Amino acid sequence: MTEIQYNVTCERIEELLKVVGNETSTEDKNFIELDFLSDLVADYEGKNFPLELPNLQEVIKLRMYEMGISQLKLSKILGISPSRMSEFISGKSEPTLKLAREISKKLKIDASVVLGVS
């Protein structure tokens, strides 16, 4: 698929979304077309716009937001100094293996993200 084909296909999907809803039969020609075109676009986007995994700093910031806690509170949860926590959040340093385990367990972050393994 070329970029022009991709753009035209996205426009067609937008048109189809106006006529296809949750109640639309899977046998409906518009539903079938939308399903087919959506798969084509997903394949194109997967090849041309791959998603990058978030880094540890982004994941920690997100988890802090989700938990409604500050950097100071997080440093207390992990048992480290606020300045050390700041170094992790800013990306200036990496956690030790022991601290990485604590981050993974206490913040429920997958170990592969904490350790930077893809």
Image (tube, rainbow, N blue to C red):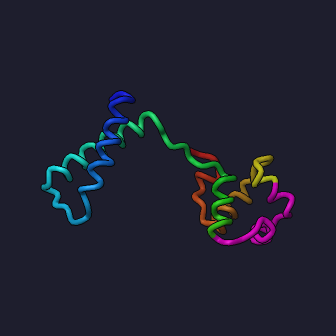
Q: Quick check: is 72 in the magenta stretch?
A: yes
Which residue appears at 42% of the width and 35% of the height? 47
**Residues shaded magenta:** 67-86
Q: Quick check: is 98 in the magenta stretch?
A: no
Q: On the image, which quarter does residue 70 sit in?
A: bottom right
Say which of 100 and 10 sits in front.
10
Say which of 98 and 77 sits in front.
77
**x%, y% of residue 38?**
30, 46
**x%, y% of residue 7?**
37, 35
Is residue 85 toward the left or the right of residue 36 in the image? right
Quadrant of the snapshot with the C terminus: top right
Say which of 83 and 5 sits in front.
5
Which residue appears at 66% of the width and 68% of the height? 106
Q: On the image, which quarter does residue 8 sit in?
A: top left
Quadrant of the snapshot with the N terminus: top left
Is residue 87 toward the left or the right of residue 40 in the image? right
